[in-house]
Protein backbone atom coordinates (compact mmCIF):
# COMPACT_ATOMS: atom_id res chain seq x y z
CA UNK A 1 0.00 0.00 0.00
CA UNK A 2 1.27 3.46 -0.93
CA UNK A 3 0.18 7.06 -0.45
CA UNK A 4 -1.09 8.45 -3.75
CA UNK A 5 -2.67 11.80 -2.91
CA UNK A 6 -3.06 14.36 -0.11
CA UNK A 7 -5.87 16.93 -0.24
CA UNK A 8 -7.21 19.73 1.96
CA UNK A 9 -10.64 21.10 2.80
CA UNK A 10 -11.25 24.25 4.83
CA UNK A 11 -14.36 24.71 6.95
CA UNK A 12 -16.32 27.96 6.70
CA UNK A 13 -19.82 29.26 7.27
CA UNK A 14 -20.18 28.33 10.95
CA UNK A 15 -16.85 29.26 12.51
CA UNK A 16 -17.53 29.97 16.19
CA UNK A 17 -16.21 33.00 18.02
CA UNK A 18 -12.82 32.41 19.59
CA UNK A 19 -12.63 35.28 22.05
CA UNK A 20 -9.75 36.82 20.11
CA UNK A 21 -8.98 40.55 19.83
CA UNK A 22 -9.70 40.38 16.09
CA UNK A 23 -12.82 38.27 16.48
CA UNK A 24 -13.54 35.39 14.11
CA UNK A 25 -16.39 35.66 11.61
CA UNK A 26 -18.50 32.69 10.45
CA UNK A 27 -16.76 32.53 7.06
CA UNK A 28 -13.22 32.69 8.44
CA UNK A 29 -11.38 29.44 7.75
CA UNK A 30 -9.33 28.48 10.82
CA UNK A 31 -9.96 24.72 10.73
CA UNK A 32 -8.75 22.62 7.81
CA UNK A 33 -9.26 18.93 7.11
CA UNK A 34 -6.59 16.85 5.39
CA UNK A 35 -7.20 13.53 3.61
CA UNK A 36 -4.48 10.99 2.86
CA UNK A 37 -5.40 8.67 -0.04
CA UNK A 38 -3.85 5.28 -0.78
CA UNK A 39 -3.66 3.05 -3.83
CA UNK A 40 -5.88 0.49 -2.05
CA UNK A 41 -8.68 3.02 -1.70
CA UNK A 42 -8.28 3.53 2.05
CA UNK A 43 -8.60 7.21 3.01
CA UNK A 44 -7.60 8.71 6.34
CA UNK A 45 -8.73 12.11 7.59
CA UNK A 46 -7.04 14.58 9.95
CA UNK A 47 -7.68 18.11 11.17
CA UNK A 48 -5.46 21.18 11.60
CA UNK A 49 -6.25 24.34 13.56
CA UNK A 50 -4.92 26.56 10.77
CA UNK A 51 -6.26 28.30 7.68
CA UNK A 52 -6.60 26.27 4.50
CA UNK A 53 -4.23 28.55 2.57
CA UNK A 54 -1.42 27.80 5.02
CA UNK A 55 -2.19 24.07 5.17
CA UNK A 56 -2.38 23.77 1.40
CA UNK A 57 0.96 25.53 0.98
CA UNK A 58 2.52 23.29 3.63
CA UNK A 59 1.15 20.15 2.00
CA UNK A 60 2.61 21.27 -1.33
CA UNK A 61 6.00 21.56 0.34
CA UNK A 62 5.71 18.26 2.21
CA UNK A 63 4.15 16.19 -0.59
CA UNK A 64 7.47 14.77 -1.93
CA UNK A 65 8.05 13.16 1.49
CA UNK A 66 4.58 11.56 1.43
CA UNK A 67 3.79 10.23 -2.03
CA UNK A 68 4.79 6.61 -2.52
CA UNK A 69 5.28 5.97 1.21
CA UNK A 70 3.70 3.11 3.16
CA UNK A 71 1.08 4.94 5.29
CA UNK A 72 1.17 2.36 8.07
CA UNK A 73 4.69 3.51 9.01
CA UNK A 74 3.21 6.56 10.66
CA UNK A 75 5.94 7.76 12.98
CA UNK A 76 8.76 7.21 10.48
CA UNK A 77 6.90 9.35 7.94
CA UNK A 78 5.93 12.07 10.41
CA UNK A 79 9.38 12.32 11.94
CA UNK A 80 10.74 12.71 8.40
CA UNK A 81 8.34 15.65 7.91
CA UNK A 82 9.56 17.27 11.14
CA UNK A 83 13.21 16.66 10.29
CA UNK A 84 12.72 18.11 6.79
CA UNK A 85 11.14 21.34 8.03
CA UNK A 86 14.04 23.08 9.80
CA UNK A 87 14.37 25.74 7.10
CA UNK A 88 10.77 26.08 5.97
CA UNK A 89 8.41 26.84 8.85
CA UNK A 90 9.25 24.21 11.43
CA UNK A 91 7.08 24.76 14.47
CA UNK A 92 4.61 26.92 12.54
CA UNK A 93 2.44 26.21 9.53
CA UNK A 94 4.40 23.11 8.53
CA UNK A 95 3.97 21.61 11.99
CA UNK A 96 0.26 22.48 12.03
CA UNK A 97 -0.23 20.77 8.67
CA UNK A 98 1.88 17.83 9.81
CA UNK A 99 -0.52 17.48 12.75
CA UNK A 100 -3.43 16.81 10.39
CA UNK A 101 -1.33 14.48 8.23
CA UNK A 102 -0.29 12.53 11.32
CA UNK A 103 -3.90 12.10 12.47
CA UNK A 104 -4.90 11.01 8.96
CA UNK A 105 -2.06 8.47 8.82
CA UNK A 106 -3.12 6.96 12.14
CA UNK A 107 -6.66 6.77 10.74
CA UNK A 108 -5.34 4.87 7.70
CA UNK A 109 -3.19 2.57 9.83
CA UNK A 110 -6.11 1.70 12.06
CA UNK A 111 -8.35 0.91 9.10
CA UNK A 112 -5.69 -1.25 7.48
CA UNK A 113 -4.85 -3.13 10.68
CA UNK A 114 -8.46 -3.42 11.82
CA UNK A 115 -7.85 -1.63 15.14
CA UNK A 116 -9.03 1.61 16.76
CA UNK A 117 -6.30 4.23 16.83
CA UNK A 118 -6.12 4.24 20.64
CA UNK A 119 -5.06 0.62 20.64
CA UNK A 120 -2.30 1.36 18.12
CA UNK A 121 -1.13 4.23 20.31
CA UNK A 122 -0.46 1.77 23.11
CA UNK A 123 -3.73 0.37 24.41
CA UNK A 124 -7.04 1.43 25.88
CA UNK A 125 -6.88 2.48 29.53
CA UNK A 126 -10.56 3.45 29.35
CA UNK A 127 -13.57 2.94 27.13
CA UNK A 128 -15.17 6.32 27.79
CA UNK A 129 -13.98 9.76 28.85
CA UNK A 130 -15.59 12.79 30.45
CA UNK A 131 -15.84 15.83 28.17
CA UNK A 132 -15.85 19.29 29.66
CA UNK A 133 -18.08 21.83 27.96
CA UNK A 134 -15.84 24.66 26.81
CA UNK A 135 -17.57 28.04 26.51
CA UNK A 136 -16.55 31.66 26.22
CA UNK A 137 -17.26 33.95 29.14
CA UNK A 138 -19.98 36.55 28.69
CA UNK A 139 -22.15 38.90 30.70
CA UNK A 140 -23.56 37.03 33.67
CA UNK A 141 -27.05 36.53 32.24
CA UNK A 142 -26.18 34.95 28.86
CA UNK A 143 -23.29 32.96 30.33
CA UNK A 144 -25.30 31.41 33.14
CA UNK A 145 -28.18 30.62 30.78
CA UNK A 146 -25.74 28.77 28.53
CA UNK A 147 -24.15 26.88 31.43
CA UNK A 148 -27.55 25.95 32.88
CA UNK A 149 -28.65 24.57 29.52
CA UNK A 150 -25.44 22.51 29.28
CA UNK A 151 -26.05 21.10 32.76
CA UNK A 152 -29.49 20.04 31.58
CA UNK A 153 -27.90 18.39 28.51
CA UNK A 154 -25.88 16.19 30.85
CA UNK A 155 -22.43 17.78 30.98
CA UNK A 156 -20.71 17.34 34.34
CA UNK A 157 -17.58 19.44 33.71
CA UNK A 158 -17.15 22.96 32.36
CA UNK A 159 -14.56 25.55 31.39
CA UNK A 160 -15.22 29.27 30.95
CA UNK A 161 -12.68 31.45 29.21
CA UNK A 162 -11.33 34.59 27.59
CA UNK A 163 -13.73 37.58 27.15
CA UNK A 164 -12.91 40.42 29.59
CA UNK A 165 -11.35 38.24 32.28
CA UNK A 166 -8.08 39.79 33.46
CA UNK A 167 -8.62 42.72 31.16
CA UNK A 168 -10.94 45.04 33.16
CA UNK A 169 -10.81 44.67 36.96
CA UNK A 170 -10.77 42.08 39.71
CA UNK A 171 -14.40 42.70 40.66
CA UNK A 172 -15.57 41.66 37.20
CA UNK A 173 -13.32 38.60 37.31
CA UNK A 174 -14.71 37.37 40.61
CA UNK A 175 -18.31 38.19 39.72
CA UNK A 176 -17.97 36.13 36.54
CA UNK A 177 -16.49 33.11 38.30
CA UNK A 178 -19.01 33.27 41.14
CA UNK A 179 -21.90 33.32 38.66
CA UNK A 180 -20.48 30.35 36.76
CA UNK A 181 -20.01 28.39 39.99
CA UNK A 182 -23.62 29.08 40.99
CA UNK A 183 -24.82 27.89 37.58
CA UNK A 184 -22.92 24.57 37.54
CA UNK A 185 -23.17 23.75 41.23
CA UNK A 186 -20.52 21.39 42.56
CA UNK A 187 -19.55 20.13 39.09
CA UNK A 188 -16.00 20.59 37.77
CA UNK A 189 -15.32 24.19 36.74
CA UNK A 190 -12.08 25.43 35.16
CA UNK A 191 -11.13 28.98 34.14
CA UNK A 192 -9.16 29.88 31.00
CA UNK A 193 -7.85 33.43 30.95
CA UNK A 194 -6.55 33.21 27.36
CA UNK A 195 -3.04 34.50 27.95
CA UNK A 196 -2.16 33.79 24.30
CA UNK A 197 -4.38 36.65 23.11
CA UNK A 198 -2.36 39.44 21.51
CA UNK A 199 -0.96 41.82 24.14
CA UNK A 200 -2.68 40.12 27.07
CA UNK A 201 -2.15 42.51 30.02
CA UNK A 202 -2.01 40.03 32.91
CA UNK A 203 1.30 39.75 34.75
CA UNK A 204 2.68 37.40 37.39
CA UNK A 205 1.45 39.45 40.36
CA UNK A 206 -2.07 39.55 38.88
CA UNK A 207 -1.98 35.81 38.21
CA UNK A 208 -0.96 35.04 41.81
CA UNK A 209 -3.81 37.18 43.22
CA UNK A 210 -6.29 35.67 40.78
CA UNK A 211 -5.23 32.12 41.62
CA UNK A 212 -6.10 32.77 45.26
CA UNK A 213 -9.52 34.07 44.25
CA UNK A 214 -10.15 31.03 42.05
CA UNK A 215 -9.28 28.72 44.93
CA UNK A 216 -12.10 30.33 46.93
CA UNK A 217 -14.50 29.16 44.21
CA UNK A 218 -13.07 25.62 44.00
CA UNK A 219 -11.80 26.04 40.44
CA UNK A 220 -10.25 22.88 39.01
CA UNK A 221 -7.46 24.63 37.11
CA UNK A 222 -6.27 28.06 35.97
CA UNK A 223 -5.46 27.94 32.26
CA UNK A 224 -3.08 30.16 30.28
CA UNK A 225 -2.78 32.81 33.01
CA UNK A 226 0.40 34.28 31.48
CA UNK A 227 1.95 34.84 28.09
CA UNK A 228 2.79 31.42 26.58
CA UNK A 229 6.46 32.41 26.33
CA UNK A 230 6.84 33.21 30.03
CA UNK A 231 8.42 29.95 31.15
CA UNK A 232 9.92 31.36 34.36
CA UNK A 233 6.67 33.12 35.22
CA UNK A 234 4.71 29.89 34.83
CA UNK A 235 7.19 28.02 37.02
CA UNK A 236 6.99 30.63 39.78
CA UNK A 237 3.21 30.85 39.56
CA UNK A 238 2.77 27.12 39.67
CA UNK A 239 4.92 26.84 42.81
CA UNK A 240 2.81 29.51 44.57
CA UNK A 241 -0.68 28.81 43.26
CA UNK A 242 -3.33 27.09 45.41
CA UNK A 243 -5.04 25.85 42.23
CA UNK A 244 -3.47 23.76 39.44
CA UNK A 245 -1.90 25.72 36.56
CA UNK A 246 -2.33 24.58 32.97
CA UNK A 247 -1.03 25.68 29.59
CA UNK A 248 0.76 24.75 26.39
CA UNK A 249 -2.00 24.96 23.79
CA UNK A 250 0.01 27.14 21.41
CA UNK A 251 3.29 25.24 21.76
CA UNK A 252 4.31 22.89 18.96
CA UNK A 253 6.50 19.77 18.89
CA UNK A 254 7.63 17.80 21.92
CA UNK A 255 10.90 19.73 22.00
CA UNK A 256 9.05 22.98 22.78
CA UNK A 257 7.16 21.34 25.63
CA UNK A 258 10.25 19.80 27.22
CA UNK A 259 11.50 22.94 29.07
CA UNK A 260 8.05 23.58 30.57
CA UNK A 261 7.79 19.99 31.74
CA UNK A 262 11.34 19.89 33.09
CA UNK A 263 10.78 23.14 35.03
CA UNK A 264 7.44 21.77 36.23
CA UNK A 265 5.78 24.94 34.98
CA UNK A 266 2.42 23.19 34.58
CA UNK A 267 0.31 20.91 36.73
CA UNK A 268 -1.67 20.10 33.58
CA UNK A 269 -0.13 20.23 30.10
CA UNK A 270 -2.47 20.92 27.19
CA UNK A 271 -1.05 20.21 23.73
CA UNK A 272 -3.42 20.74 20.82
CA UNK A 273 -3.22 17.59 18.70
CA UNK A 274 -4.36 19.57 15.63
CA UNK A 275 -1.44 22.02 16.00
CA UNK A 276 1.39 20.52 18.00
CA UNK A 277 2.39 17.66 15.70
CA UNK A 278 -0.56 15.27 15.78
CA UNK A 279 -1.23 12.20 17.85
CA UNK A 280 2.38 11.07 17.62
CA UNK A 281 3.67 14.22 19.34
CA UNK A 282 0.82 14.45 21.86
CA UNK A 283 1.49 10.87 22.92
CA UNK A 284 5.21 11.57 23.42
CA UNK A 285 4.40 14.72 25.40
CA UNK A 286 2.00 12.66 27.49
CA UNK A 287 4.70 10.10 28.22
CA UNK A 288 7.15 12.81 29.30
CA UNK A 289 4.49 14.43 31.48
CA UNK A 290 3.48 11.15 33.12
CA UNK A 291 7.06 10.48 34.22
CA UNK A 292 7.08 13.87 35.96
CA UNK A 293 3.68 13.55 37.61
CA UNK A 294 2.03 16.06 35.25
CA UNK A 295 -1.40 15.36 33.75
CA UNK A 296 -2.21 15.83 30.07
CA UNK A 297 -5.63 17.23 29.17
CA UNK A 298 -5.68 18.03 25.44
CA UNK A 299 -6.67 21.43 24.13
CA UNK A 300 -9.55 20.79 21.74
CA UNK A 301 -11.14 23.94 20.31
CA UNK A 302 -11.40 22.26 16.91
CA UNK A 303 -13.57 19.82 14.90
CA UNK A 304 -15.28 16.46 15.18
CA UNK A 305 -12.17 14.86 13.71
CA UNK A 306 -10.02 16.58 16.32
CA UNK A 307 -12.36 15.43 19.08
CA UNK A 308 -12.18 11.84 17.80
CA UNK A 309 -8.37 12.05 17.84
CA UNK A 310 -8.40 13.39 21.41
CA UNK A 311 -10.72 10.59 22.54
CA UNK A 312 -8.27 8.00 21.20
CA UNK A 313 -5.37 9.87 22.82
CA UNK A 314 -7.23 9.80 26.14
CA UNK A 315 -7.70 6.07 25.83
CA UNK A 316 -3.96 5.54 25.43
CA UNK A 317 -2.69 7.79 28.27
CA UNK A 318 -3.25 6.57 31.79
CA UNK A 319 -4.04 9.95 33.41
CA UNK A 320 -5.93 11.67 30.58
CA UNK A 321 -9.49 11.38 31.83
CA UNK A 322 -10.91 14.60 30.33
CA UNK A 323 -11.26 16.03 26.82
CA UNK A 324 -12.32 19.50 25.72
CA UNK A 325 -15.69 19.68 23.95
CA UNK A 326 -16.35 22.95 22.11
CA UNK A 327 -20.09 23.18 22.57
CA UNK A 328 -22.36 24.77 20.00
CA UNK A 329 -19.93 24.32 17.11
CA UNK A 330 -21.30 22.81 13.91
CA UNK A 331 -17.78 21.65 13.04
CA UNK A 332 -17.85 19.44 16.13
CA UNK A 333 -21.54 18.53 16.38
CA UNK A 334 -22.38 18.00 12.69
CA UNK A 335 -19.14 17.03 10.97
CA UNK A 336 -19.15 13.32 11.78
CA UNK A 337 -22.07 11.11 10.81
CA UNK A 338 -22.18 9.27 14.10
CA UNK A 339 -22.60 12.45 16.18
CA UNK A 340 -21.64 12.79 19.83
CA UNK A 341 -23.84 11.46 22.61
CA UNK A 342 -23.33 11.83 26.35
CA UNK A 343 -24.18 8.77 28.39
CA UNK A 344 -26.22 8.95 31.58
CA UNK A 345 -23.15 9.95 33.59
CA UNK A 346 -21.97 12.64 31.18
CA UNK A 347 -19.25 10.62 29.41
CA UNK A 348 -18.44 10.10 25.73
CA UNK A 349 -17.70 6.61 24.45
CA UNK A 350 -14.35 6.26 22.72
CA UNK A 351 -14.91 4.91 19.17
CA UNK A 352 -14.17 1.22 18.77
CA UNK A 353 -14.27 0.89 14.99
CA UNK A 354 -10.95 0.69 13.10
CA UNK A 355 -9.06 3.94 12.63
CA UNK A 356 -10.56 7.04 14.20
CA UNK A 357 -13.87 5.22 14.09
CA UNK A 358 -15.87 8.14 12.69
CA UNK A 359 -17.17 9.01 9.22
CA UNK A 360 -17.43 12.47 7.72
CA UNK A 361 -21.04 13.57 7.20
CA UNK A 362 -21.59 14.33 3.50
CA UNK A 363 -24.26 16.95 4.19
CA UNK A 364 -21.95 18.84 6.57
CA UNK A 365 -19.18 18.85 3.97
CA UNK A 366 -21.64 20.19 1.42
CA UNK A 367 -22.65 22.94 3.83
CA UNK A 368 -19.32 23.92 5.35
CA UNK A 369 -16.51 22.44 3.26
CA UNK A 370 -14.58 24.44 0.68
CA UNK A 371 -14.36 21.16 -1.27
CA UNK A 372 -17.60 19.17 -0.89
CA UNK A 373 -16.18 16.09 -2.65
CA UNK A 374 -13.28 15.99 -0.18
CA UNK A 375 -12.00 12.57 0.98
CA UNK A 376 -13.94 10.58 -1.60
CA UNK A 377 -11.98 7.50 -2.74
CA UNK A 378 -10.85 7.55 -6.35
CA UNK A 379 -13.32 5.91 -8.72
Image: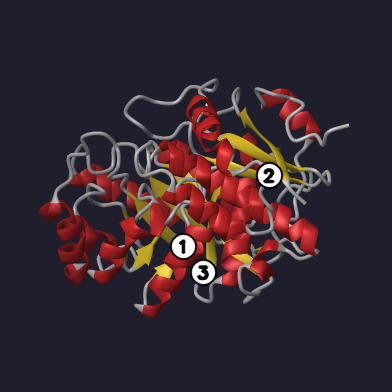
At 61% from the left and 57% from the top, the residue drawn is 74
Whether residue 356 is visible here, answered yes or no, is no
Instruction: Identify residue for label 1.
Output: 297
In the rendered image, which quarter contains the C terminus? top right
Q: Farthest left residue? A: 205
Q: Name which of mark 1 and mark 2 comes first in the sequence.
A: 2
Q: CB of mark 1 within 8 Å of CB of mark 3?
A: yes
Q: Name which of mark 2 and mark 3 comes first in the sequence.
A: 2
Position of 360 with respect to 48 (left or right) is right
Between 221 and 249, the one lying in front of the other is: 249
Marks 1 and 3, how far apart at CA: 6 Å
Position of 241 with respect to 91 (left or right) is left
Q: Name which of mark 1 and mark 3 comes first in the sequence.
A: 1
Between 213 and 250, the one lying in front of the other is: 250
Q: Position of residue 171 (x, y in %)?
A: 21, 45
For residue 260, above or below residue 378 = below
Instruction: Identify residue for label 3.
Output: 320
Between 88 and 236, the one lying in front of the other is: 88
Which one is closest to the eye, mark 2 or mark 3?
2
Secondary structure at badge 1 equals loop
Whether residue 26 is visible here, answered yes or no, is yes
Secondary structure at badge 2 equals loop
The quarter of the picture where residue 138 lies is top left
Q: Residues within 10 Å of mark 3 (few under 14, many from 20)?
A: many
Q: CB of mark 2 within 8 Å of CB of mark 3?
A: no
User: What label sits on residue 68 in the rendered view?
Assistant: 2
At 66% from the left and 68% from the top, the residue drawn is 120
Amino acid sequence: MRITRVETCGLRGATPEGGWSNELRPDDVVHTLVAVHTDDGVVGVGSAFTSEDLVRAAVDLLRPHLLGQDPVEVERIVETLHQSAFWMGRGGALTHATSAIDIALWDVAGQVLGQPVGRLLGGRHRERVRPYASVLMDEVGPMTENLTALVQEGFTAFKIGWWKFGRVDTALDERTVAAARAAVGDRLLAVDVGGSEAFFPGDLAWAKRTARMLADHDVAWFEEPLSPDDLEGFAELRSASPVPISGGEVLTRRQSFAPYLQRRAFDIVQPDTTKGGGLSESRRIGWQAQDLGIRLVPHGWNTGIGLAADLHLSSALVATDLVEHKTGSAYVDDLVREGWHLDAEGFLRIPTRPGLGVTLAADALQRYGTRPAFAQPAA
